[in-house]
Amino acid sequence: MDQRTREYLRGRFGDHYRRGSVDLPPAADEREWGHIPFTAGEGTTMVRHQSHLDIGALDAFLASERPRHVYFSAGRYADPSAGSMDEKGWRESDLVFDLDADHLPGVDPEADSYASMLATCKDALYALLDFLEDDFAFEDLTVVFSGGRGYHVHVRDESIRGLGRDQRREIVDYVRGIGLDDVTQLTRTETVSGMGLKNPVEKRTLHTDGGWGRRVHRRLLAVADEVRELDEDEGVARLREYDGIGEKGATTLQKAMTDNYDALRAGNLEAAGQYTRKLAGLLFEDAIAEEGAPIDEPVTTDINRLIRLPGSLHGGSGLAVRHIERDELDDFDPLVDAVPETFRGHDITVETDAARVVELDGETYNISEGINTVKESVGVFLMARGHARKSTEAE
């Protein structure tokens, strides 16, 4: 980033901070604070081991220093400005989850547009929230658009703030489906005898009231509902599409789904004998592959992690780090709702390194290589991402 571009962005970031305020986390004075300034050259320098008291009134500090990135710690400390972690005196930490669009399965950062990657990341966010709200019943959740490539979720329930790294890793493993190898881990088994049976038999029932068992059960019932809408031959053909299920197994399953649906709805894996268990095992594999939350493990297990401050600007995009109310998440569009008002309303001139397409603020812009006059939000986005530099304004 050349000097003109750096000074322009730094100045406009300062204007943003003078116009509004950021969202302080709970116990702000017990947290470590850090920031990355606009420095010359390609590298960055993290300034950390600060406390909220050290830097004074945060709004005034940000307006004066005009940093490129702003962070606060998940951890709460006795002395947050101490120079080492041991000296800080750790007390407790928020449980923080990070979803990064270009690390998600099926995303190709070289081929996929920024907008499509963020849309995929939002789907992953819903999967994560399903675990946090339904499986763990956490209540104190803060959802944040990172301003860059994804989303953060801060969990501040008192019950989890004292967890250590190993306990947090267990939560990570659960939401990613790590350690689950077979559908039998999601079932309960009871021995049934009498009732005319020559020998005792084992009855397996899938857990349906929550957790991964509920996810597999939803898939099983979805298949059953689909088959019940088809005629017999079509239903058998549909079930034969699953690996390892032949004509006999598909016929047995089709009959069970038609005649014994209530047993399936109760989680009974004996409804079609071994074939129900076979199908459940295949659906288990699909659930693990498709419904796990692809979070960034080091963020969640790190009790000292620095995370972006809501209300601050992301120096790699010029977008705002936005706190999103849970009931507003469906309608949230990061490429509209995270565009700072400071960068709306006028045009600037930039010089781009190549022809590019930018989707921002509800519009699509075809940017040519060389000098372009663009809306400031687009120009800031391109400069912050390293795709353009500030040019002198046209006369």
Image: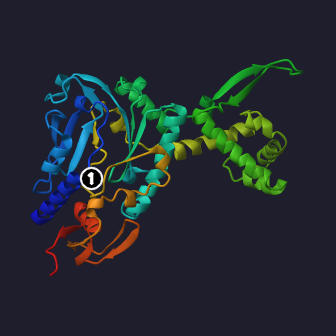
393 relative to 342 in the view: left or right? left
Task: Locate the N terminus by quadrant.
Answer: bottom left
Most foreground residue, 37 or 220: 37
Most foreground residue, 205 or 89: 89
* Quarter of the view holding residue 315: bottom left
* Quarter of the view holding residue 156: top left
The residue sitting at the right extreme is: 196
Residue 272 shows in the view? no
Determine the residue positioned at 20% across, 27% down. Answer: 85
The residue sitting at the front extreme is: 19
Task: Locate the C terminus by quadrant.
Answer: bottom left
Labels in figure, total: 1
377 relative to 213 in the view: left or right? left
Residue 40 spot, x, y in % from top left: 10, 56
Residue 290 shows in the view? yes
23 relative to 278 in the view: left or right? left
Q: Label 1 sits on what residue type?
A: His
Most foreground residue, 176 or 327: 327
Determine the residue positioned at 35% across, 73% down. Answer: 365
Determine the residue positioned at 27% across, 73% down. Answer: 374
Determine the residue positioned at 47% across, 39% down. Answer: 176
Q: Is residue 380 above or below residue 143?
A: below
Residue 218 spot, x, y in % from top left: 65, 42
250 relative to 329 in the view: left or right? right
Residue 38 spot, x, y in % from top left: 14, 53
Label 1: state its secondary structure: loop
Q: Residues within 10 Å of mark 1 (few under 14, many from 20)?
A: many
The residue sitting at the bottom extreme is: 395
Residue 114 spot, x, y in % from top left: 38, 61
Give the residue at mark 1: 314
